[in-house]
Image (tube, rainbow, N blue to C red):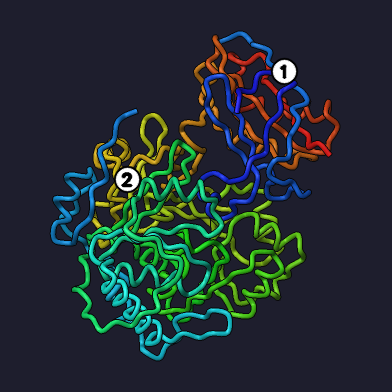
Amino acid sequence: MRPLESADDELQCLPGLSGFASAIDPLAPVFECRGRDDRVVQRIARPLGATGSDQPGRRIKVVGIEAHRGEGSGQTQSPPARLTGVDDAVEINRSSGLRRLERAVPFPVGPSTFEDVWSRRADNSIAVLDADRVWTTRELHNEVERVARALTAAGHGGGRRLAWILGNDVGSLISLLATVRVGAVWIGLSSRATKAERDVVLADAHPDAVLEALPDATPAVDLPEPPAPTAPAAIAYTSGTTGRPKGAVHTQQQLLYPAAAAIATEGLDENARIGTPLPLSTLNILLLGPLTALACGGVAVMMKRTSGSEVAEDLARYSVTRALLVPTIVHDLVSQGVSPAQLQAVQRLIVGGAGYDHGRATAAQDILGVPLVASYGLSEAPTGVARMRVGDGGASPLPGVDIRVEHDGEITLSSVTEGPWAGCWQGTLGYWGDPAATSELWRGGRLHTGDAGSLGADGRLLVRGRLSEMINRGGASIAPAEVEAALLALDGVADAAVFGVPDERLGDIVAAAVVGNADVEALERDVRRAAGKFVNERTRRRPMIVPVVMET
C-alpha cells in the first residue's frame, strides 16, 4: 500500500487484526496506513462500540488533513536447528541460539509437569465438557496416551515439531497433551487462517507433520519416558505486526505457569469451570483456558459460539465460573441485552486482546454485574504477566514476574530472585531459528517487551502502548493510546486511531483518524482540545487532525 500523502488518499480496510486479536478474529477489518517513512499503523476499523457491517475491502475516505507545521522545538539466518531429543537439548540450544535452562524450579502451587497434572486429579472427576459429551479424567488420560502411542508409532516422537489444525473441541487439548507426552513440540494453526497465513508459519517452523485430526490408530507400542520440564514443548507464533511472524519456544513447565499463577492469585480449585469461545489453536488461549482448568483440578468447557447472546447461553448452560473473552464479545454481551441473571455463575471475565476503553469497560462491568479483569501479556511470556480489575489504577505483576521500566520507558521482564517464586517464571527460550531476534529479545538477562509503560509507587504497571508507536514530537514522547482514550471520551466519536506523520523539524506531527457522527467542525474543535493536553505548549502550534468518515 502506498504512503498516505494527501486528503485525497484513501485507506484500504484489510482483513486481520494485529497482536493477540489476530488469532481471535481474522475476519475483522483494520486500518492500515503507512507514513512517508513506510511505518505501518494498524487500528481496528470496527471497534468496541462501533456499529455497522464493515467488510474487508470496504474503503474509508480521508475527508480532511491539516498538516500545519507549528514552530518549536536482512540478516541472513541459519537453518533452524532440529530438536532430536531431551538429552541433547543443551547442545541444540547452543546451535539454535535458544536460551539454556540449567534446571526447572517447581512452582510453589499447582503442577509443574504434565505428569503432575494427572497425579493431582481423581480418575472419576469431570475433566472436560464438550457439547453433550462429558469426559472424566480417566477417559481423557486414556485418550491422550492412545494418541501419544499413535504419534510414537508414526515416528513423531521426541523433538519433532507437529503442527495441528483443530477446532474448539477436546481434540485441541488432547493434541497438546499427547504432543508433550512424547517429547515433541506443539504448534497450533488456525482453521480460519488463510493459506498464505499458514504458509508463513509453516515456512518458518518446518514441521515434521501437519495433522488436521487426531490419529485413529491404537498401536501396542511403549511410550518414551516423559520429557524433562525444561524441554521445548510448544511454539507460539506472534502475529507479525513488527515484521514476519516469529515463533516463541516454550518449555513444558512454562506452559503450566498460567495455571500456577491463577491458583495463587484467584484460588482456583476443583470447583472452577473455565470456558472460552476464543480459538484454541492459539497457544496462550489453550493454556489460559483448558490447560489451566485441568491443572487446577477443575473442568474445561469447550465453547464454539461467539455471538454475545450465544456466549451467554453457553456460560449459563455449563455454569462457567471463569471466562476468557475479548472486548468485542464483552460489547456484544452488553449490546445484546445480556443480564446479570444470565451470568450468575461467572465469577470473573478475563479480558485480553485489543485495547479496551476504560469508560466502556467500567460501564460493561456495571451492566453485566461481573468483575472484568484486564490482562497484559505477550506470546513470549507465554501469556499474561500482569492483571488489573477494571477500575484499578494499574496492573499488578503476577507471581514470580519481576517487571521493570527502563530509562527509555520500555517494559522488561525477568524472574524474581527472592521468595517462593524465585526462578519459577522463565519466559520463552527464544525465537525458533532466529538467534539474532532472540539476542535482541533477551538483553542483560531481561526480556524486552517492546512496550512502553510506567510503574506507580505501589508497583502497579501502566501500559502506554508499543514503544515503536510512540510519537516523538519536538522531543516530547506521546503515547497514541492515551490520546485515543481522550478522543473516545468525546460525544459522537465511535473510534479513533492516533499516529505520527514524519516532519522535518519536529520529527513527528500528531495525526488522528476519527470515526463518528458528530458535526465535523465541532468534532475538530473538540479533538484539538482533547488532544492538546498531551502536547507541550512550547513545542505545539496546533495538532494535525485527520477526520475519517465511513462511506455509505
Residue annotated with mark 2:
431
In this rendering, would 157 be left or right of 391? Answer: left
Residue annotated with mark 1:
66
In this rendering, would 151 be left or right of 47? Answer: left
Q: Position of residue 311 (x, y in %)?
A: 65, 69
Q: Nearer the viewer, residue 101 or 343?
A: 101
Q: Position of residue 371 (x, y in %)?
A: 59, 64
Indicate the quadrant where residue 333 lies: bottom right
Q: Position of residue 76 (x, y in %)?
A: 29, 31
Q: Amino acid at mark 1?
A: Glu
Q: Amino acid at mark 2?
A: Tyr
Secondary-structure class at tag 2: strand
C-alpha distance separating marks 1 and 2: 42 Å
Q: Quadrant of the C terminus?
A: top right
Indicate the quadrant where residue 488 lies: top right
Q: Residue at x 50, y 47 (%)?
A: 197
Q: Quadrant of the N terminus?
A: top right
Q: Nearer the viewer, residue 191 or 127?
A: 191
Q: Nearer the viewer, residue 212 or 545?
A: 212
Secondary-structure class at tag 1: loop
